[in-house]
Image (cartoon, helix red, strand yellow):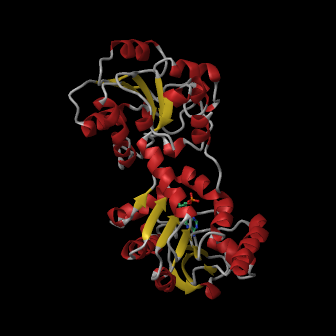
Amino acid sequence: MKTLKDIDIDGKRVFIRCDFNVPKDEFGNITDDRRIRSALQTIRYCIDRGCKIILASHYERPEAGQYEEKYSLVPVGKRLHTLLKIKNELFMANDVVGPDAKEKAEKMQAGDVLLLENLRYEVGETANEEAFAKELASFADIYVNDAFGACHRKHASIYAIAKQFDAKHKAAGFLMSKEVNFFSKVLENPIRPFVAVVGGSKVSGKLQALTNLVSKVDKVIVGGGMAFTFLKAQGYEIGNSLVEDDLLDEARAIMKKAHDLGVKFYLPVDFVVAPEFSENTAVKYLPWQEIPVGWMGLDTGPASARLFREVLNDAQTIIWNGPMGVYEMDKFSKGSIMMSHHIAETHATTIVGGGDTADVTARAGDIDEMTFVSTGGGASLKLIEGIKLPGLEALEL
Ligand code: AMP
């Protein structure tokens, strides 16, 4: 992949599409700044080459065309300034392509950084509008896409904008190339045994990824809410647990494919079950055979944790996407926390994808033990599915 190292950027105006969509708490404090820290290498590289740097990102989902303070990138700008530790100015525009952004861009000196406001304040962003892309492109001589977490979306700052620059004036940023290279290396040439751990709420969101993974790995562990669709597909009673009845055939097809390919397929053997979806409810630890009618499984149980530990024991490569239970509630977080510990304990190359899963490893205190924690959940799933990401495609046009 062509990165900004391969093009001449010295002293130029560089537009960097970042993914600064970081989680915040109820007081507006940033709770996890990994996505900002991950962008520093690319930004610093441009600063050292005397560029004028224009940064752009979306932040959550504001009503298009409407400014709302809670979606502003101002807290991101402040954190970025602290992390960058630069003497130069970090300008913050109070619009995206409006008069403030243009005026501030005009005033920039070599090494200055300008952060535009939330791209999604403009309707043209999600509509992949060419006119808006042209306005964005007019800020710079060079376009750099470093927004791995957003590059599965065909939006103006990801896709349409890239057409405004020829091959010598656009490239991927360092974070983007690290993410993509890591996933492709692991998926193309994994050291075996290769184990996929897939969880989360729904089979539907990960169906394609699961189907693709089954043909690449040696073992699959399925946990989380999606496990119940697989159990029901085998005719078992699952009480009121989450299930996608319309996907029972697909679930059977995945298990058959695994069987035909000699891939070992593991489901939880016990669950933490409750009569209702609530933190303040009675719970029981039961094998799947004993889930009472009307109750639901909200986490994998201790016997499953032991089983999964054995399964992971000889792994050399592990890819993990999706929690084992409703980890947001303490009562149902143990299965995910144990999974995180077990994965961290192995000597395997471990890749964690998805915001929830990264959050679990952080809560478990294991995040530094993982080989690679991706900044993009949706984008990493698309890579696993074998789909070409629009953001990468646009860089090659
Ligand atoms: P996903 O976005 O598909 O990766 O799903 C993540 C969500 O799955 C988390 O918010 C979990 O709370 C939820 N989840 C995991 N296990 C279960 C379960 N057994 N029942 C309901 N939701 C679950």
User: At x 71% / y 65%, what residue is drawn?
Assistant: 244
Q: Position of residue 202 (x, y in %)?
A: 64, 62
Q: In the image, is residue 341 above or below residue 171?
A: below
Q: Judge from the rendering whether residue 11 lies leftward or rightward of residue 394; answer left or right.
A: left
Q: In the image, is residue 61 above or below residue 342?
A: above
Quarter containing ligand 1? bottom right
Q: Judge from the rendering whether residue 350 lies leftward or rightward of residue 29; answer left or right.
A: right
Instruction: Give the residue at the far left of this rendering.
Output: 87
Give the quarter of the image for residue 226: bottom right
Q: Position of residue 73 (x, y in %)?
A: 40, 32
Give the quarter of the image for residue 395: top right
Q: Position of residue 191 (x, y in %)?
A: 50, 72
Image mark count? 0
User: At x 45% / y 74%, what residue is drawn?
Assistant: 339
Q: Judge from the rendering whether residue 47 lies leftward or rightward of residue 300; answer left or right.
A: left
Q: Judge from the rendering whether residue 217 lies leftward or rightward of residue 307; answer left or right.
A: right
- Which of 126/110 is in front? 110
Is residue 322 in view from this perspective?
no
User: At x 36% / y 31%, what residue is drawn?
Assistant: 74
Is residue 315 in view from this perspective?
yes
The quadrant the C terminus occupies is: top right
- Which of 311/277 is in front? 311
Q: In the image, is residue 44 above or below residue 307?
A: above
User: At x 38% / y 74%, what residue is drawn?
Assistant: 341
Q: Position of residue 30 (x, y in %)?
A: 35, 44
